[in-house]
Image (cartoon, rainbow, N blue to C red):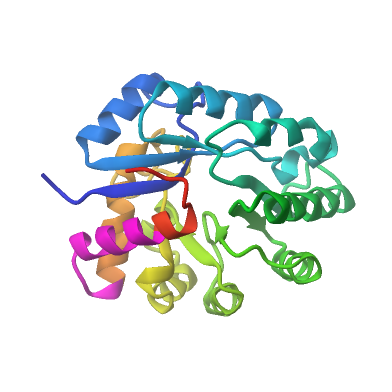
Amino acid sequence: MGPTLIDSHCHVHDPRIPDGTAGAVAAARAAGVTAMVTVGCDRATSLAAIAAAAEHDGVHATVGLHPHDASDGVETIVDLLDTPGIVAVGEAGLDYYYEHSPREAQRTAFAAQIQLAHERDLPLVIHTRDAWDDTFDVLAAEGTPTRTIFHCFTGGPDEVRRALAIGAFVSFSGIVTFPNATDLHEAARMCPLERTLVETDSPYLAPVPNRGKPNRPAWVVHVAEGLATLHGTTTESVAAATRTAAQLAFPGIRS
């Protein structure tokens, strides 16, 4: 049996997940993944995440409004946070690469979800792309929640320093296994393992050696292997540290 891991961010409820939700959960468990955080991005996907968590032990749901969907308004998801067992608010944040919602709508929705995390005493899961300065500015204005997670971290050394300075956890995806992601590799080396999480973001961003295929939670081990190489340690050490970090970041996780 290999190392036991927690996939801190996936979309195992997504209909595109290989082998369906049940099959993907079973394969993940067989691969040593003891818990998965399945993440909502709007009302429909938050409801799907809640359903997946209700049906499968070790699967935990979040409720959030992704920046792509910020124009829907946070009022479309607020009531779902009353569902027992929700482990975080998000994913929330800013995405200036695609700008599927106007920037002002994104900032408004992000700020509102930060406040929901404060009010509910829940962790906050952040998505940020091409919007680092504004992301940190909104967090400073609203107050960074005690447990804040930068999901699918794609920054470099400067961004990881800023994330760590505000007490955030940093979650690395399959991108950290890509050979050309040199700034990200440096950031990963700088991030203490006790503040590091591993994720798949499946069905997206499959890690090497499966790059380009539909991703699945079972492959989170390859993210841990990539981090182990960067830190000059064992996969087992990365697995143990990131499992502990995930349980600190998401107190609602049982694994």
The image shows residue 117, relative to residue 163, as above or below, that is above
Residue 65: name its quadrant. top right
The image shows residue 40, relative to residue 243, as above or below, that is above
Q: Residue at x 32, y 64 (%)?
A: 227
Residue 101 placement (x, y as % from top left):
82, 43
The quarter in which the C terminus is drawn is top left
Q: Residue at x 43, y 53 (%)?
A: 173
Q: Please give left or right for residue 180 compared with residue 159 in the image.
A: left
Q: Please give left or right for residue 109 compared with residue 149 in the image.
A: right
Is residue 62 visible to the viewer in this orientation of the structure? yes
Q: Nearer the viewer, residue 145 or 206?
A: 145
The quarter in which the N terminus is drawn is top left
Is residue 16 visible to the viewer in this orientation of the structure? no
Q: Residue at x 55, y 79 (%)?
A: 161
Residue 33: name its quadrant. top left
Q: Residue at x 42, y 21 (%)?
A: 55
Q: Which residues are magenta?
A: 231-245
The image shows residue 148, relative to residue 119, as above or below, that is below
Q: Please give left or right for residue 57 compared with residue 44 in the image.
A: left
Residue 197 placement (x, y as % from top left):
41, 59
Predominant SS of the magenta segment: helix
Q: Nearer the viewer, residue 176 or 119?
A: 119
Residue 230 placement (x, y as % from top left):
30, 71
Q: Nearer the viewer, residue 145 or 174?
A: 145
Q: Is residue 242 magenta?
A: yes
The image shows residue 207, relative to residue 53, as above or below, that is below
Residue 167: name its quadrant. bottom right
Q: Please give left or right for residue 245 compared with residue 78 in the image.
A: left
Query: How many numbered dots are placed on residues in this image?
Result: 0
Residue 245 placement (x, y as % from top left):
39, 61
